[in-house]
Image (cartoon, grey):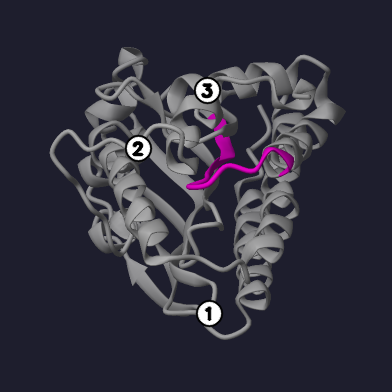
Amino acid sequence: MPALPIDEVKKFLMDLQDEICAALEKADGKAKFFEEKWDRAGGGGGRTRVIADGDVIEKGGVNFSHVFGKGLPPSATAQRPEMAGADFQAMGVSLVIHPRNPHVPTSHANVRLFVAEKPGAEPVWWFGGGFDLTPYYGVKEDCVHWHQTCREACEPFGADVYPRFKKACDEYFLIKHRGEPRGIGGIIFDDFNEWEFDKCFKMLQSVGRAYTKAYVPIVEKHKNDKYTEKEVVFQEYRRGRYAEFNLVIDRGTQFGLQSGGRTESILMSLPPRVRWGYNWRPEPGTPEAELTEYYLKDRDWLNEK
């Protein structure tokens, strides 16, 4: 079997990090990313880039990492017990953007490659990634645009790809203990090696490049919207839901912490200010209530009227 083109994937991911950071800095207009390069004790390292206190972005990060080591952590072998004890390497770009304005949604994206190897056996590899949107105040046109861009990224690889990846996203980003979705979804795929390596890599590239096409127009549309302190308070309550998902459910967070990853980079995804209230609920008939009653549902956004 020919050697996997690991260096080619790594170059794409590092270039993608540069492209996304440049697009987000332009959309913000003020703040710039601060970069910190780091090394992992068990092998590998990365580039953490953080942006904060901007005119548009209150806090965000766009991270690249390439880590490797011996012995997969439990979070990686729960569904693949035959890979226990394998050497591994994982590389990817992961990002979360928390805007200041409650009318600009939070967004998340990542694209990654994972390779596990055991002596005498061919490497086991898979790709993963996707992007999803978490609005605080729903706008139907934004949801449709987001999902149209998701579909366009998937279309070159088959008509069935977007529906499958959308369904997987809806199922994954469910706050199970709340019985409610984290946002309006998008696309997600994991453990993906259904095609030959090159085709899977091309799909990863398509998905990675689609993120800014999906997100930046929504940012530009709403970044100057007027907002009230009441809307900021609601945003903070909803950010609490976001934090709950990332700390309790997210597999990426679990893998990063269990594999000895860099804690500051892993927890970069948490919002800067959050709020919890006992048995808190929005008032019926308000835009705040509309978020959970209408927008946070597994909707077919491409056919919404």
Helix, strand or loop at label 1? It is: loop
Does label 2 or label 3 sit earlier along the sequence?
A: 2
* Label 3, residues with CA under 10 Å away: few <14, some 14-19, many ≥20: some
Residue at 71% over, 34% down:
147
Q: Is residue 112 visible?
A: yes
Numbered badge on residue 6: none
Q: Position of residue 98 (x, y in %)?
A: 45, 60
Q: CA distance from mark 2 to mark 1?
A: 30 Å
Q: CA distance from mark 1 to mark 3?
A: 31 Å
Numbered badge on residue 283: 2
Residue at 62% over, 21% down:
299
Q: Which residue is mark 3?
A: 297
Q: Which residue is mark 1?
A: 55
In this rendering, position of residue 80 left or right of residue 129 = left
Q: Compare residues 196 and 286 and report the one nearer the observer.
A: 286
Q: Compare residues 269 and 113 and report the one nearer the observer.
A: 269
Q: Nearer the viewer, mark 2 or mark 1?
A: 2
* Relative to 171, residue 113 above or below: below
Query: Which residue lies most toward the bottom here?
Result: 30
* Label 1, residues with CA under 10 Å away: few <14, some 14-19, many ≥20: some
Does label 1 or label 3 sit earlier along the sequence?
A: 1
In this rendering, position of residue 255 left or right of residue 291 = left
Picture quarter containing residue 303?
Answer: top right
Query: Which residue lies most toward the left here?
Result: 278
Q: Marks 2 and 1: CB-CB under 8 Å? A: no
Task: Work out which quarter of the rendered image holds the N terminus and state it.
Answer: top right
